[in-house]
Amino acid sequence: MNSIIEIERCFTQVELNYLMPLLKKWTKNDYEVINWFNTHQIPSCADKTPSELCDLGEKDRFLQYVKHIEYGGFS
């Protein structure tokens, strides 16, 4: 995914309202959000990136991961 708009297309508005502030808090800017989304491998999701999970229709696994990390869990 090459833009924030492409990332946003994967999620509902409610999900975006939760997700985007967290991702922006974890990174410095939109460019880094995009980079993180495309490169961060999630061990608990077979080392797939958030982008790959969305492409596979597994955004719920990604959202579960984000919630887990937000509440102090480990990946």
Image (cartoon, rainbow, N blue to C red):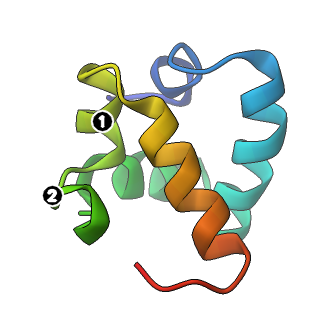
Question: What amino acid is labelled 1 in the image?
Answer: Leu
Does dot 1 land on a helix, a strand or a loop? helix
Residue located 45% across and 31% down the image: 59
For this view, does 42 lie left or right of residue 4? left
The residue pinned by badge 1 equals 53
Q: CA distance from mark 1 to mark 2?
A: 10 Å
Nearer to me, 2 or 10: 10
Residue located 73% across and 31% down the image: 16
Residue 37 visible in image: yes
Q: Quadrant of the C terminus?
A: bottom left
- Determine whether 3 is above or below 24 in the image: above
Quadrant in the rendering for residue 40: bottom left
Q: Quadrant of the N terminus?
A: top left
Q: Please state which of the two labelled residues, at mark 1 or mark 2, is closer to the viewer.
A: 2
Local packing at callout 2 (Cα closer than 10 Å; few below 14, some 14-19, many 20+) is: few
Q: Please tell me which of labels 1 and 2 falls first in the chain.
A: 2
- Determine whether 37 is above or below 25 in the image: above
Local packing at callout 1 (Cα closer than 10 Å; few below 14, some 14-19, many 20+) is: some
- Tell me where residue 65 appears, x and y as whole percent: 50, 59
Residue 28 visible in image: no
Residue located 29% across and 66% down the image: 44
- Tell me where residue 60 appears, x and y as whole percent: 50, 35
- Tell me where residue 39 appears, x and y as whole percent: 24, 57
The residue pinned by badge 2 equals 46
